[in-house]
Image (cartoon, rainbow, N blue to C red):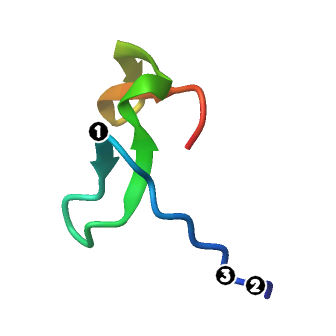
Amino acid sequence: MGRLFLITLQGRIYSCRHCDTHLGIADDIISKSFHCRHGRAYLFNNV
């Protein structure tokens, strides 16, 4: 499969509500009014 690559993020972060995995930094948000086929979403520059 591949190697697992983990990075611990610093500052204001967004994480999974179920497993608490760090997903992205607040500074990387492009849009908070983005919509995907499942509903409202945040659009990140880097995740």
Percent of width and height locating residue 27: 43, 24
Residue shown at 36% from the left, 66% from the top: 21
Which residue lies at the image location 34% right of the left edge and 29% below the top edge?
41
Q: Amino acid at mark 2?
A: Arg
Q: Which residue is mark 1?
A: 12
Give, as a three-letter code, the residue at label 3: Leu
Alpha-carbon span between mark 2 and mark 1: 27 Å
Comparing 42 with 12, the one in front is 12
Alpha-carbon span between mark 2 and mark 3:
4 Å
Task: Please give the residue where the numbered disc 2 appears in the rendered image.
Answer: 3
Horizontal relation, residue 44 to residue 21: left or right: right
Task: Check whether the beta carbons of the residues at disc 2 and disc 3 lie within 8 A of each other.
Answer: yes
Picture residue at 40% right of the left edge, 49% below the top? 10
Residue type at mark 1?
Arg
Determine which of the numbered discs, if any, sits on residue 44 in the image.
none
Direction right: furthest residue: 2
Badge 3 crowding class, 10 Å Cα cut-off, few under 14, some 14 to 19, many 20 or more, is few
Distance Cα–Cα, label 1 vs label 3: 23 Å
